């Protein structure tokens, strides 16, 4: 069965490399080849999740490159493959023939392939290689429109920031060798001798926090929004930003072995969830709002890792992948049709393109944590585990949940009320963009079953997390009520402010942000001087 696992990682990497090398010469065939490869990978991922293959190859003296699909990685490979397939189908309508489609689809496949290696690696060497490949391809994708200096600077910032944090993995590998974990197996890192154990943990934590854009590394993710919308969708949902959270969930025993690792990771995740949620509240561009919300939601996954809630954190990661991919693709569809991502210019966009609007509404309501949608259930599962560990952390996490309702309701209010007079873009959404939005919206609605009776037991058994706390009914009701009240107050505030502005003949910004004047950020190509 090792051939199945090798095929799972080789198909996207090799297909992507061929398309990249072909460049414009493969442009006509690139969309079909990219989607076909993604669908093959999805089939291989489902088969791998069922059969649990293992692969192993010699690398250095005494060190092997190991890959395996176990319980946790079985969930991850299906998530990565499914989101990649949805994003690439959408991209066939978003990336036009005037673009270098061979390079785009090739890089996206390599990006996804690197993530698949990351989630199946059982030893540090293949993990390091995939970690670096993700960083390099993210740089190329964020700076895809490389003739624009601002986009190139954003790509450089993302690469250098994450690359600096990545040095922690090299430090961890060296410390593991010195500390007696000479095989460099991930499950053996926690057995390293002191003081090397502390160095291993510090390196892993630094690398994971940098990749997942947690404080103090969060700033790079804002500039990453200058890349194409499908890149943002994959980057924020099931690829690089999720990789750090996955690694911390995978290496929970290492965090527990240090004494300091679990509380530090928990507090970083909780504080990031609150502060970056407040940053999201202040945004006036839908992609920037979604970017800050990604930092906040991944903060809850990191909080789960620190609290030892592997199953709850994994469920939140999977549900968030569907939610955030759908939201970014909906924003990309509006960008294609209306030529902007500014919230003020998207007034009434829900009704101009009903399928896109419905998908965005479902994703936004799920992101707000409104029952019975997915993130309401998964967030409460995380908080239930945190409450057992530290009531103060539980309060901070609950505050982050309330803030998520505020920024989600703000985004939805702008796109669901009023009507913008701006007319830019093509005015149409290609039909091929719609099926991925529908599928992802369905996932955003129902993936909460992963933490409900039945699904919860299966997930816990798969990831080896039997015995995690379950939220009481009162906690779930209170959480849902807080989300509804926070979202309702936000909706009322924006409606009242708009009414006051209409009576006064001017739009007055309030504490929940406003809209920049026409001509600001948001044009689809943003001044790109020529084709890439």
Image (cartoon, rainbow, N blue to C red):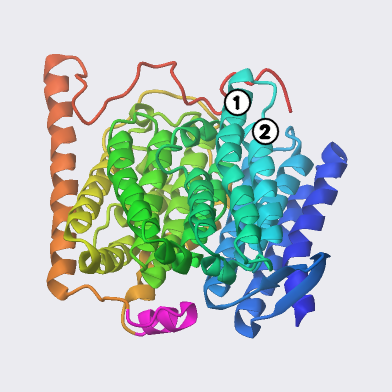
* Kind of element beneath mark 2: loop
Task: Name the spot of residue 285 as percent of width and height, x first.
Answer: 39, 31
- Looking at the rendered image, the quarter that the C terminus falls into is top right
> Which stretch appears magenta?
454-467
Q: Is the magenta region chiefly helix, strand or loop?
A: helix
Asked if residue 29 is positioned above or below residue 193 in the image, the reply reads: above
Report the residue at 51% width, 30% height from top: 223
Residue 50: tell me if it is visible. yes
Q: Considering only order in the chain, which callout, 1 or 2, is on the residue closer to the N terminus? A: 2
Left/right of residue 397 with respect to residue 294 in the rendered view: left
Q: Are marks 2 and 1 in contact (CB under 8 Å)?
A: yes
Report the residue at 22% width, 31% height from top: 512
Residue 442: tell me if it is visible. no
Taking the magenta stretch, the answer to whether it contains residue 75 is: no
- Looking at the rendered image, the quarter that the N terminus falls into is bottom right
Give neighbour class at mark 2: few <14, some 14-19, many 20+ (Cα, 10 Å): many
Asked if residue 76 is positioned above or below residue 52 in the image, the reply reads: above
The mark found on residue 151 in the picture is: 1
Left/right of residue 399 with respect to residue 321 in the rendered view: left
Between 335 and 476, the one nearer to me in the picture: 476
Indicate the quadrant where residue 310 lies. Answer: bottom left
* Kind of element beneath mark 1: helix
Q: What residue is pinned by disc 2?
A: 144
């Amino acid at each position: 069965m090792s051939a199945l696992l090798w095929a799972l990682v080789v198909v996207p990497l090799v297909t992507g490399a061929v398309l990249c090398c072909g460049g414009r010469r493969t442009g006509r065939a690139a969309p079909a080849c990219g989607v076909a490869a993604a669908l093959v990978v999805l089939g291989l991922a489902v088969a791998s999740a069922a059969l649990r293959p293992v692969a192993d190859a010699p690398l250095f003296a005494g060190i092997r490159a190991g890959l395996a699909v176990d319980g946790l990685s079985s969930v991850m490979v299906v998530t990565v493959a499914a989101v990649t397939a949805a994003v690439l189908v959408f991209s066939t309508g978003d990336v036009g023939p005037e673009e270098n489609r061979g390079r785009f689809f090739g890089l996206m496949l390599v990006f996804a392939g690197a993530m698949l290696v990351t989630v199946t690696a059982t030893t540090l060497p293949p993990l390091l290689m995939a970690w670096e490949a993700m960083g390099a391809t993210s740089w190329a994708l964020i700076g895809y429109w490389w003739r624009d200096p601002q986009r190139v600077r954003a790509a450089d910032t993302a690469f250098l920031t994450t690359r600096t944090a990545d040095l922690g993995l090299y430090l961890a590998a060296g410390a593991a060798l010195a500390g007696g974990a000479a095989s460099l197996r991930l499950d053996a890192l926690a057995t390293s001798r002191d003081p090397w154990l502390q160095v291993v943990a510090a390196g892993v934590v630094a690398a994971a926090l940098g990749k997942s854009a947690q404080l103090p590394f969060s700033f790079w993710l804002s500039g990453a929004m200058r890349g194409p919308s499908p890149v943002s969708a994959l980057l924020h949902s099931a690829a690089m930003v999720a990789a750090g959270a996955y690694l911390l969930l995978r290496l929970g025993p290492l965090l527990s072995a240090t004494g300091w690792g679990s509380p530090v990771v928990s507090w970083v995740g909780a504080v990031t969830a609150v502060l970056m949620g407040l940053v999201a509240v202040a945004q006036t561009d839908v992609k920037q709002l979604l970017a800050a919300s990604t930092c906040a939601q991944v903060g809850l996954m990191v909080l789960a890792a620190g609290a030892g809630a592997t199953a709850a954190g994994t469920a939140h990661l999977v549900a968030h992948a569907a939610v955030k991919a759908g939201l970014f693709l909906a924003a990309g569809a509006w960008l294609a049709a209306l030529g902007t991502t500014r919230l003020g210019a998207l007034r009434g966009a829900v009704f101009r393109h009903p399928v896109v609007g419905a998908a965005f509404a479902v994703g936004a309501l799920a992101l707000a944590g409104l029952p019975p949608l997915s993130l309401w259930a998964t967030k409460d599962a995380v908080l239930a585990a945190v409450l057992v560990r530290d009531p103060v952390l539980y309060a901070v996490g609950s505050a982050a949940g309330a803030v998520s309702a505020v920024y989600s309701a703000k985004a939805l209010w702008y796109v669901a009320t009023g009507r913008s007079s701006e007319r830019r873009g093509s005015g149409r959404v290609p039909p091929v963009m719609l099926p991925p939005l529908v599928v992802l919206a369905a996932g955003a609605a129902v993936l909460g079953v992963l933490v409900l009776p039945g699904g919860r037991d299966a997930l816990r058994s798969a990831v080896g997390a039997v015995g995690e706390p379950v939220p009481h009914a009162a906690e779930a009701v209170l959480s849902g009520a807080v989300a509804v009240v926070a979202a309702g107050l936000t909706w009322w505030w924006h409606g009242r402010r708009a009414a006051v502005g209409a009576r006064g003949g001017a739009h007055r910004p309030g504490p929940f942000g406003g809209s920049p004047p026409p001509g600001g950020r948001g044009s689809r190509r943003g001044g790109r001087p020529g084709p890439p």
